[in-house]
């Protein structure tokens, strides 16, 4: 349903949104439909190399992988949207390095416009590209009564010398988005602390230690759920809390796009909440109770 | 210095600090040991050498010490250290450079499971053009006995939730990805041959 105020982006979902983060892909597309953001998937996109590329490949190769995507996306007159925080990070770091190394640009045969290509993560897509006004205007089911601990993770605002959309120690952009949909963001200390997701596949114990700290701190600050904009954080926060059976009352972990989508009228299944590992139903039931009281 | 007592030190290798500086693109010599990197490091508690100690050892040319420590593998790459470094050293890039030197020199990584995961990831990415997560995790478990029994329940839950894509998606541009991987390997071989 393309309307005159439709916004178009080149969509670069990344490998995990095809598999372990299918729920994130569902959430993104449901939310974007409500916002009239058209997701035009980059045809034949390839992997950005992620952390593994950064560790095992040399600088040239680690830059060449995301550069394939930048080059392909630069064909189009629209920004790139990379909901995967790792993909976003690799694209942004590649742009940083290519700006500083014209000889590498030449060696990889890249055109200057790959440097001007705007790359958005979920957070700055919502705040800057869509804009808080459009979000506010379209809210049909405000998030009233839900206390949200916004969790930024490491990949959106670091390293500090890439182009940053917010302060790398005390960001507020996710909180602004939560406020725009009527939610109640809590102030907590560890919103920029690493959850260890980069090592989640093999260092389970270390991750449980880090996630445990995050969850306790979010709870202590009054958070009823954590909101992320990264599927690696999400999986790690959900799966490394220790006991995630309902009796243990684990902290629900949702995507920022889940909350925005729900506030804009998406259903629970449209945003993929049924695929989450921690049961989010108690949280949503509480919300319904509050909105029933209020109206 | 505790670092010197605890670690087995064989020799100081001339030119090692410069090599790491070049590989990582970081001004290793600028570190004055303020320790902010270690203070903010979320993984410091599971590292045998702390980030500031790794930098010091690199400055001193203690190649065996740093290439055999687990710290370079236990870095999650969160870049908190770099956010706070007054000397503008991106420690995460130093760790990545050390991890890579460890592999191209044919040493045994102190945390083999992390290295195995990274290798499996690149292998899968080269094969299909996109990383196939089920393959990456299966290969890691197959090759690392320590990992085999871990996360079985998690895997079952993900499967039940429809979150394990069993089939990879192949793209034509996987050719370009393979070429990039092969070029990186060829360059590593050439450097290795010319190093003393």
Image (tube, rainbow, N blue to C red):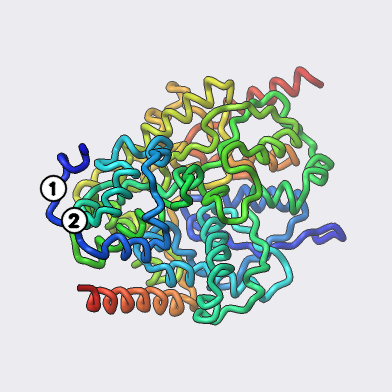
- Could you say where residue A132 lies in the image, as x and y percent from the top left? 78, 43
Residue A273 in sight in this render: no
State whether residue B100 is above or below residue B189.
above
In the foreground, B167 or A5? A5
Reading the image, the residue beneath label 1 is B8
Q: CA distance from mark 1 to mark 2?
A: 8 Å
- Could you say where residue A9 lies in the image, as x and y percent from the top left? 70, 62
Q: Is residue B167 left or right of residue A274?
A: left
The chain letter under disc 2 is B
Residue at 44% from the left image edge and 63% from the top image edge: A49
Residue at 56% from the left image edge and 54% from the top image edge: A161
- Could you say where residue B15 lies in the image, as x and y percent from the top left? 26, 65
State whether residue B164 is above or below residue A294.
below
Residue situated furthest top in the rendering:
A293
Q: Are marks 1 and 2 in contact (CB under 8 Å)?
A: yes
Q: Which numbered disc, 1 or 2, marks the residue that appears first in the sequence?
A: 1
In the foreground, B94 or A1? B94
Q: Is residue A13 left or right of residue A293?
A: left
Residue at 63% from the left image edge and 66% from the top image edge: A41
Reading the image, the residue beneath label 2 is B64
């Amino acid at each position: 349903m393309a309307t005159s105020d439709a916004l178009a982006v080149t969509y670069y979902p990344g490998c995990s949104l095809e598999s372990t983060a299918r729920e994130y892909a569902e959430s993104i597309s449901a939310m974007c439909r409500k916002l009239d953001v058209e997701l035009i998937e980059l045809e034949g996109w390839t992997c950005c190399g992620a952390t593994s590329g950064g560790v095992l490949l040399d600088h040239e190769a680690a830059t060449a992988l995301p550069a394939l995507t930048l080059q392909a996306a630069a064909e189009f007159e629209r920004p790139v949207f990379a909901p995967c925080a790792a993909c976003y990070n690799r694209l942004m770091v590649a742009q940083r390095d290519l700006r500083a190394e014209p000889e590498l640009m030449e060696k990889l045969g890249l055109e200057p416009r790959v440097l001007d290509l705007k790359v958005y993560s979920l957070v700055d897509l919502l705040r800057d590209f869509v804009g808080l006004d459009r979000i506010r205007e379209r809210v049909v089911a405000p998030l009233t009564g839900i206390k949200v601990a916004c969790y930024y993770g490491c990949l959106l605002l670091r390293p500090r010398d890439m182009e940053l959309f917010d302060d790398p120690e005390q960001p507020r952009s996710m909180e602004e988005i939560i406020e725009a949909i009527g939610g109640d963001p809590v102030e907590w200390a560890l919103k920029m602390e690493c959850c260890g997701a980069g090592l989640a596949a093999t260092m389970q114990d270390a991750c449980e230690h880090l996630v445990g700290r995050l969850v306790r701190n979010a709870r202590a600050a009054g958070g009823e759920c954590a909101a992320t904009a990264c599927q690696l954080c999400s999986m790690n926060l959900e799966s490394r809390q220790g006991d995630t059976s309902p009796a243990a009352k684990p902290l629900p972990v949702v995507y920022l796009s889940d909350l925005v989508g729900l506030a804009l009228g998406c259903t629970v299944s449209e945003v993929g909440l049924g695929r989450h590992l921690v049961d989010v139903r108690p949280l949503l039931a509480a919300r319904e109770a509050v909105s029933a009281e209020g109206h | 210095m505790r670092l010197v007592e605890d670690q087995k030190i064989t020799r100081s290798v001339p030119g090692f600090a410069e090599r790491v500086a070049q590989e990582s693109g970081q001004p290793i010599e600028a570190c004055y040991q303020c320790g902010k990197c270690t203070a903010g490091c979320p993984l410091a508690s599971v590292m045998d050498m702390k980030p500031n100690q790794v930098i010091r050892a690199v400055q001193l040319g203690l190649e065996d010490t740093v290439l055999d420590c687990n710290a370079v593998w236990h870095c999650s790459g969160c870049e908190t250290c770099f956010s706070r470094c007054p000397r503008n050293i991106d420690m995460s890039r130093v760790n990545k450079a050390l991890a890579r030197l460890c592999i191209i020199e044919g040493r045994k990584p102190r945390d083999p499971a992390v290295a195995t995961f990274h290798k499996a990831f690149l292998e899968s990415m080269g094969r299909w053009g996109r990383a196939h997560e089920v393959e990456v995790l299966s290969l890691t478990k197959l090759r690392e006995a320590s990992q085999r029994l871990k996360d079985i329940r998690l895997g079952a839950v993900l499967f039940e939730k429809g979150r394990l894509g069993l089939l990879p998606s192949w793209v034509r541009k996987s050719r370009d990805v393979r070429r990039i991987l092969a070029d990186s390997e060829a360059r590593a071989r050439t450097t290795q041959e010319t190093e003393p």
